[in-house]
Image: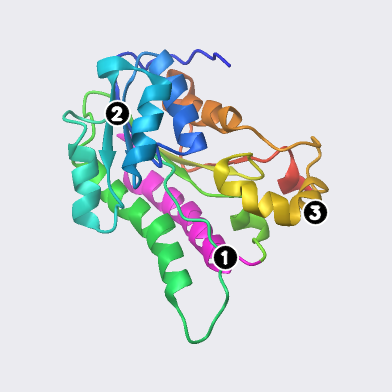
Amino acid sequence: MSVTFGGMEGRQIVITGGAGGIGQACARQLLQAGARVLLVDVDGARLDAARQTLGGGNQLGTHVSVIANPEQAAECLDAAGRPIYALIHMAGLFEPDPLDPDDHSAYDRALSSNLHNAYDLSVAFKSRRDTSVVSRIVLCSSGAYRRGSPGRVAYSVAKAGIVGLTRALSRQFAPHTLVNAVAPNAIATPMTEAVFQERGPAIMSIIPLGRFGQAHETASVVSFLCSDGATYITGQTINIDGGAANS
């Protein structure tokens, strides 16, 4: 699906979780709009495959990182090799949380891989942004922040934290950076396959549009938030869920 977004030509954008379904969909749209894109992901082989799929030539770069601490967050942004117009943070971990009183590791991983890295990247972005324009940060929350996700309590906590982070940063970084979040829910990607197999009918029953979403439908909202059409939007979390938030 081809959609045109203005104001991207030659601008540097960094996408974490870049080898994932939504990350690649964002990259495809932004490359088509003339942006330079750096994909960051934990999996080098998947990054190589994404690069083959996307093409992009010298407009597309890759960087392997788990973004486990502030130093690695800074390295991710420095890998772009130029001031950054937009940070799109799609990287995250979606795993079951057993609520085991003797094992805190699932909670720790959820917070580290979904929220702490967003904070570290945003802090690093402040000194690496393109100061010639109003820059952008787009973080990824989830419908889980509103409704909760059964079996994934820690993930739900982390994604709620993204909303608070977005609101606070939008005030602190104003007016030089617009900070927004998207909250996808029931989007068909490799990450959601297992939960769709487990709870697909129950999830579908609360979606007024009667279908699961596609990666490009989330990417188009992200691309819009990075475009010249979104210059008066900041501090917002946009639900992309087929109407489920209203059910």
Q: Nearer the viewer, residue 136 or 28?
A: 28
Whether the residues at callouts 3 and 1 have beta carbons within 8 Å, the answer is: no
Q: Position of residue 42 (x, y in %)?
A: 34, 47
Residue 136 seen in this snapshot: no
Q: Position of residue 31 (x, y in %)?
A: 39, 18
Classify 10 Å Cα crowding around label 1: few (below 14), some (14-19), many (20 and above).
some
Q: Main secondary structure of the magenta part?
A: helix
Residue linked to disc 3: 202
Query: What's the amino acid at mark 3?
Result: Ala
Residue linked to disc 2: 85
Q: Earlier in the sequence, mark 1 or mark 2?
A: 2
The residue that appears at 22% across and 51% down in the rendered structure is: 72
Q: Earlier in the sequence, mark 3 or mark 2?
A: 2
Q: With respect to residue 144, does 183 lie above or below?
A: above
Q: Nearer the viewer, mark 3 or mark 2?
A: 3
Residue linked to disc 1: 96
Q: CA distance from mark 1 to mark 2?
A: 35 Å
Query: What's the amino acid at mark 2?
Result: Tyr
Residue 184 sits inside the magenta stretch: no
Q: How is the image coloured?
A: rainbow
Please report the bounds of the magenta region as a residue range: 151-178
